[in-house]
Amino acid sequence: MSAELKGKAAIVTGSSRGIGRAIATTLGAMQASVAVNFFSNESAARETVALVEKAGGRAVAIQADMGRVAAIERLFDQTADAFGRLDILVNNAGVRLYKPIADFTETEYDHLFDTNVKGVFFACRLAARRMADGGRIINISSSVTRVLLPNYGGYSATKGAVDQITRVLAKELGPRGITVNAISPGPTDTDLFRDGKSQAEIDGFAQQTALGRIGKPEDIANAVALLAGDKAGWISGQNICANGGFVA
């Protein structure tokens, strides 16, 4: 990749593995400095740091629970200490819980919304205050907001909230040249996606896409790279479905 992001600094939340790791590594290949956020798996985060550095970027691993505002503030503080600036925020961290709405407990609801909505909201708040003009905020949403999938009610609700945060913040930060967009992956081949699913179920998801396969983390990372780059300066307030034609 080009050195398009040389001299720029990024935070990628939830980037110790899966889609987040692919995003961090791709930004590193564009020579960005990357704060690799993790919740509990420090060894995996350090593996991501090594991959970013191998790709050509700088990186540091920073622990933070994205459901706690004080931890999010510490993540931003430590990123500033490491790199001296912030140009790109990718809100990727999230948790999933698939069950009927009728069976949800208050504790389960709070856990889901704390990470998936509160974390995104307050990370965006800090980015709005600290990000350099001309920056990029990219929120990872989901294509499930566009389909009627049983047991996805709680999770879909959190991603619907992310979509609205994205649209409003784009208007608020536009005068500073900061773009705010969402990317909605479809079924993507990660350990988290495969957990609890049979191969037949995975094959069924693949057959629902226009391209006949489930996505790879790199597919999502490439979409992030597009939005993070200079050529995407006229794209803001959008939700881009990177789902292989799973749903429009």
Image (cartoon, rainbow, N blue to C red):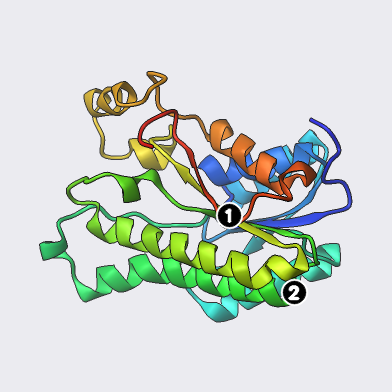
- Is residue 224 rendered to the left or right of residue 17? right
Kind of residue indicated by mark 1:
Asn
Residue with the most extreme bottom position: 70
Q: Quadrant of the C terminus?
A: top left
Task: Describe residue 1's horizontal placement relative to residue 128 as left or right.
Answer: right
* Pointer 1 residue: 181
Q: Which residue position holds label 2?
A: 130
Task: Identify the residue shown where x is 61% and y is 68%.
Answer: 171
Residue 93: x and y in percent read 51, 57
Using the numbered discs, state the Cα–Cα distance from disc 2 to disc 1 in whole angstroms.
Answer: 18 Å
Mark 2 neighbour class, 10 Å CA radius: few under 14, some 14 to 19, many 20 or more: some
Task: Pick whichever, 58 or 30, lies toward us.
Answer: 30
Instruction: Tell me where residue 240 appears, x and y as whole percent.
Output: 52, 44
Residue that appears at 33% across and 51% down? 145
SS state under label 2: helix
Farthest top residue in view: 212
Q: Position of residue 225 (x, y in %)?
A: 68, 41
